[in-house]
Structure formats: structure tokens, C-alpha cells
């Protein structure tokens, strides 16, 4: 039976609990793979944002450390859920795909009919691709597309990327080492030699537990959205893991988190004066279906202008998103420039000092 916490908390306290769960209060992780495993999956369709999302959680990590983890395969980047690229531990990719792939492919069926992609087309491209990456070789997207075209498989109008996506969904290919800011593709079984083997029910329970530990306090609906797993299956999985979690009631809704996060409520939740310069698409903002706890609804459009799915970089102060930021200039002249949500409330001296420290950490990350 899960422990339950029945105390009054504010939105900022909820936000700081999430910062703590995500390793964003400076005492999180010592190595890049450790941070990614703890988060389970980190949104990564924008590579530069994803690299900093890891770096901000590993205080001593530099850009080269995160890129190195992708180059040596201790972290992988693929499409495990929501049809969106994520970073995750290599041993987790196959069993998560086993849970999520069928639903994702069902969701793209109409688009694949428009692109005239059939099962036999995918199989033909699988044989071509595996021949190209045989023996541990890596192939660029351009090389794969050229091979597809030569075999009579068109790649225009997004047909090529959908074919590659299908090959990654079936664990035939996986994005591998970086070539500047693009990844080459490699054979899944060559690049990932050890995979966990979990059945669907066991896997959903495992994924739920790890999400709530790494993102909590969060709700079952948050997880169902994040994973694209039907809420009915999520609810069935909860009894399997609730004993390892703590329940928190907030505004009449049940939230779940790790015992370690819940303990902070007794000791005093840290981070009241914390200021972070988070990348766009960071899990702290994006990883929940209801973001209103940390992002005031009246300012949501300023983080995702026009609801276009492109998340801006976020300034987070004391557990609340208070504005956006941008890096202007380059080299020694580079500066992090904040854009507060409310122009009538300029940043105070303490917040500005915290932001300067966050900016210095970001510049140090880029330079190392």
C-alpha cells in the first residue's frame, strides 16, 4: 500500500519537488548515462536542446561528455514514444518499443497510405539498409536515401524519413554516432548488444514507476500522455508499483512521487532561490500533460507560441517558469538574455545573480 501525504503545498513547492526528482537542484547525477537512465526518456527532437538538457542535470559534464555518450552508445536517441525523438538508456529501448510501437504505427497508417508505403516496401528497405550497415558500418540518412532511391523506393515528400522511422520502430536500425550535428544509422543488434526483456504488463508497470520517480509529483494522466499508453492500462499497472511510491493529494487530484522526493516535504524542499536556464523542450516543462503547476496558463503561449509544438528556452525561478531566454552573440561576447513574462516586474537582484550563474554554467558546458 502506498504511503499518502496529506499536507498543503503550493504550486512552487510542487515545482521544486519536480526539480529535485529530475536532478535539477545541483545534487543529481555524476555521469551522463546515469542522468538519462534516471529520467527514463528525455525529449530530444532538437539535438542541441537535448544535449543541454542532460548537461544541466550533470554539474560537471561538458558538451563533449554528452556527445561522447551518443558516440559510444552508452546513451541512444530514437523514437520510443509519441513519434518523437528521445534520449534513453540503450538497454531500455527494445522493451519500450515493444509496448509503444503498435500504437504509433496505427497512428501513422493514414499518412503511410498517402505516401504509398506498404509492408513490402518497408521489408525491401530493411534489406537494403541492413546490407549498407553490415559489419558495424554506419550510414548517413543521405546514403540510406540514395540506396532506397536506387532500388526504386522514393524518398521525397517525407517518404524517406517515414521509412527510416519504421525501420527504427522495428528495431532494425537505430541512430548511432554523431557526424557533426547529424546522427548516422547503425544496425540495432550491433549497436545495442544487451536489452532487457519485459512483457507488456510488466513493462508498463516498470515504465510507470520510473516515470513517477523521475518526474514526480505527477499524475497517471501525465504518464498516459507522456507514454501514449491508454489510461485504462496505466490504472491497472498502478497497484503493481504503488507500494514503491508516495501519494500526494493536491487540489483534489492524486499525484505520485518517489519516497526520496516526499521526504523533502519533512525536511524542507530545497531550491527556493534556485534559478535555472533550461533548454527548449526540457522535460521539466514538456513532460506533463498539465503544465499549469509550473507554467502559469496565461503565459503558456510565450513558451509555445501559437501552440506550434516548438518550446522556447525557459527561465525557472524557485520552481516556477517565469520567462524565456536566448543566447546572443558568440565567444566572449556571448550573453544569456532573459525575457520575463511580465514586463512590469523586472527581475530582482537575487534572480539576476542566479541567472548569471546559470549562464556561466551554460557557457562552461558549451566550451568543454
Image (cartoon, helix red, strand yellow):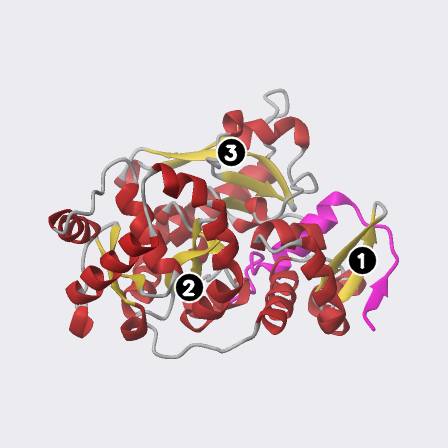
Mark 3 surroundings within 10 Å by alpha-carbon count, few (fewer than 14), some (14 through 19), many (20 or more): many
Q: Marks 1 and 3: which is nearer the front?
A: 1
Question: Residue 321 in the image: x percent, y percent?
Answer: 60, 39
How much space separates mark 2 and mark 1, taking CA atoms?
Answer: 33 Å
Q: Which residues are magenta?
A: 1-30
Mark 1 surroundings within 10 Å by alpha-carbon count, few (fewer than 14), some (14 through 19), many (20 or more): many
Instruction: Look at mark 2 in the image and give the residue it sits on.
Output: 60
Residue 324 tag number: 3
Q: Residue at x 88, y 58 (%)?
A: 6
Q: Marks 2 and 1: which is nearer the front?
A: 1
Question: Residue 286 in the image: x percent, y percent?
Answer: 56, 45
Residue sitting nearer the eye, 300 or 240: 240
Residue 248 tag number: 1
How much space separates mark 1 and mark 3, taking CA atoms?
Answer: 30 Å
Label 2 element class? loop
Q: Residue at x 33, y 47 (%)?
A: 162
In the displayed image of the protein, which residue is found farthest to the top? 344
Which of the two discs, 2 and 1, labels the residue nearer the N terminus?
Answer: 2
Left or right of residue 182, residue 44 in this image: right
Q: Residue at x 57, y 55 (%)?
A: 227
Amino acid at each position: 500500500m502506498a504511503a499518502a501525504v496529506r499536507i498543503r503545498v503550493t504550486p512552487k513547492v510542487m515545482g521544486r519537488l519536480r526539480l529535485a526528482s529530475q536532478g535539477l537542484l545541483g545534487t543529481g547525477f555524476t555521469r551522463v548515462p546515469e542522468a538519462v537512465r534516471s529520467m527514463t526518456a528525455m525529449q530530444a527532437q532538437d539535438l542541441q536542446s537535448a544535449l543541454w538538457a542532460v548537461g544541466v542535470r550533470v554539474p560537471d559534464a561538458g558538451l563533449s561528455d554528452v556527445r561522447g555518450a551518443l558516440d559510444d552508445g552508452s546513451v541512444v536517441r530514437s523514437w520510443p514514444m509519441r513519434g518523437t525523438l528521445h534520449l534513453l538508456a540503450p538497454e531500455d529501448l527494445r522493451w519500450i518499443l515493444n509496448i509503444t510501437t503498435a500504437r504509433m504505427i496505427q497512428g501513422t497508417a493514414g499518412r503511410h497510405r498517402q505516401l504509398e508505403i506498404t509492408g513490402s516496401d518497408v521489408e525491401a528497405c530493411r534489406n537494403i539498409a541492413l546490407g549498407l550497415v553490415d559489419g558495424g558500418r554506419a550510414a548517413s540518412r543521405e546514403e540510406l536515401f540514395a540506396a532506397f532511391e536506387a532500388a526504386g523506393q522514393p524518398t521525397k515528400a517525407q517518404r524517406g524519413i517515414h521509412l527510416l522511422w519504421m525501420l527504427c520502430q522495428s528495431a532494425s536500425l537505430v541512430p548511432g554516432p554523431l557526424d557533426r550535428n547529424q546522427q548516422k544509422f547503425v544496425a540495432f543488434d550491433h549497436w545495442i548488444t544487451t536489452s532487457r526483456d519485459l512483457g507488456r504488463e510488466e513493462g508498463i508497470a516498470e515504465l510507470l514507476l520510473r516515470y513517477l520517480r523521475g518526474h514526480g509529483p505527477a499524475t497517471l494522466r501525465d504518464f498516459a500522455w507522456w507514454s501514449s499508453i491508454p489510461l485504462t492500462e496505466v490504472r491497472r499497472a498502478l497497484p503493481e508499483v504503488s507500494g514503491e511510491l508516495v501519494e500526494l493529494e493536491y487540489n483534489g487530484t492524486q499525484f505520485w512521487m518517489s519516497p526520496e522526493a516526499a521526504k523533502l516535504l519533512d525536511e524542507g524542499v530545497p531550491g527556493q532561490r534556485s534559478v535555472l536556464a533550461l533548454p527548449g523542450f526540457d522535460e521539466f516543462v514538456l513532460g506533463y500533460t498539465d503544465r499549469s503547476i509550473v507554467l502559469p496558463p496565461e503565459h503558456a503561449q510565450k513558451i509555445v507560441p501559437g501552440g506550434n509544438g516548438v518550446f522556447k528556452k525557459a527561465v525557472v525561478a524557485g520552481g516556477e517558469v517565469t520567462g524565456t531566454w536566448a543566447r546572443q552573440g558568440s565567444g566572449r561576447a556571448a550573453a544569456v538574455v532573459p525575457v520575463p513574462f511580465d514586463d512590469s516586474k523586472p527581475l530582482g537582484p537575487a534572480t539576476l545573480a542566479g541567472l548569471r550563474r546559470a549562464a556561466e554554467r551554460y557557457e562552461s558546458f558549451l566550451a568543454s
